[in-house]
Image (cartoon, rainbow, N blue to C red):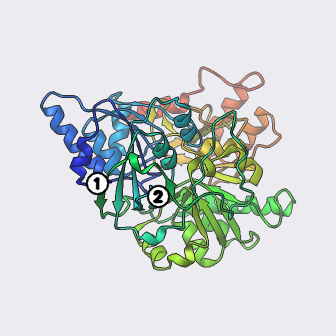
Amino acid sequence: MHNLSAADAANMIKNGERVGFSGFTPAGSVKAIPRALGERAVREHAEGRELKIGVFTGASTGDSLDGSLARADAVFLRAPYQTNKDFRNHVNAEKTDFFDLHLSLMPQFVRYGFLGKIDWAIVEAVSVSADGKIVPTTSVGTSPTFCRMADKILVEINDYHPTALEGLHDIYECDVPPNRREIPLYQPKERIGKPFIHVDPRKIVGVVRNNAPDETAGFTPTDEVRNGIGENVAEFFAREMAEGRIPKSFLPVQSGVGNVANAVLGAMGSHAQIPVFTMFSEVIQDSVIELIEQGHIDFASGTSLTVSKDTLVRIYANLAAFKKQLILRPQEITNSPELIRRLGILSINTAIEVDIYGNVNSSHFFGSKLMNGIGGSGDFTRNAYISTFTCPSTAKDGAISSIVPFCSHIDHSEHSVQVIVTEQGIADLRGKSPRQRAQAIIENCAHPDFRPRLRDYLKNGKGHIPHDLSKAFSFHLDYLKTLEK
């Protein structure tokens, strides 16, 4: 197990190889080695030699990984999910092949060999022992499976994070069919695995030391629209409890990432009728930590600790206490369809646009331009006890409606989406026909400025799902025309 510089480690990777990197969001994403690999790719390309690799991760990563490699034109294939502007531009310019994937499937696709041979696993850790015990930093993601399936492993020890993180993680991997068994987890607080990733130490070819914080971005302050969405979601769940459809002890909650998600969780925490609850989610973000500190959340299970720098400082200052209320697991556990359905998860995710029949687009603008990806929203939406999508009723400073006649891209169909919430109100779609769903979404969720036009569309449509194909994308086309002026 040799100590290497980042440049030495990057020099080991060959053109055309496939690399599994740690990271789920920028949390736990490797930093020094991919930066060095990007610098090497720039030099190789300048001398007429190609250097491109396949990049596989748990989800999105930091700029040191996706950004550095995109700017160096060093990626021939990427999966799944990303949030980096430079990488997104490469994908939309068709310079890099990218395929999206439900995040629960990523580890098993690697194990099944569906993505080809993984040559390298490169993972960030707080420690690695001589007998091959790797303790991750602030995320788990797909790292255990990458380490098991890769021919060779590079470990990037990040001294920014304390070694006392050991014990925060619960590493459990599923077997492959026909030997796969049920996941023996029955409460979010339970542990079923080990506190480290255990690998054959002979596969670890080098260790690189680094000392850099996660490249997580802070969240912008909430506003009236986001607060309105949050209050509507909290009120909906409180009403479901009052009607007996959610037990009085409540159910575990999953929430997407971002400012709307933070506002929703904040509203739930402050609602008088919602009791102390548990998170069973992918990402643990600032609002979750604040609600734990306030006593509104008693435990949070996730695969990444995606918090601002100031929040992470607070966690590390009181780490022993937080380790009793937080756990990080592989994404195939946090996003397991079996567990989501069995535990009765209340899912809350964010849409780019919603059509009047309940289809949701969460990944593309105007049908063709990738934004981020589907992430884990499909895992939760399809299997949740109640699946909820949120979005502001308008976008582009009110120039376009987020409620449209027909989504330009569909990630979640009407069959999976149960509740739509905007700052305007709530549309409960359960048990409704397509026309009834459309009426509920138009009258409760659409912005008043766009309701007359949506009503006309519905009135003129024909059939079980009353579409007018000549006008299905009229909202999108009208906005694109304004950009041409």
Q: Nearer the viewer, residue 396 or 291?
A: 291
User: Is residue 159 depicted above or below 85 in this figure?
Assistant: below
Crowding near pointer 1: few (<14 within 10 Å), some, many (20+)?
few
Q: Residue at x 69, y 61 (%)?
A: 188
**Residue 456, which numbered label?**
none
Q: Which residue is mark 1?
A: 2
Give residue 98's quadrant in the image. Answer: top left
**Residue 133, which numbered label?**
2
The mark that comes first in sequence, 1 or 2, is 1
Q: Quadrant of the N terminus?
A: bottom left
Q: Is residue 390 visible?
A: no
Q: Residue at x 30, y 39 (%)?
A: 70
Distance Cα–Cα, label 1 vs label 2: 16 Å
Q: Is residue 45 left or right of residue 24?
A: left
Determine whether the residue tagged by mark 1 lies in a helix, strand or loop: loop
Q: Position of residue 59 (x, y in %)?
A: 48, 46
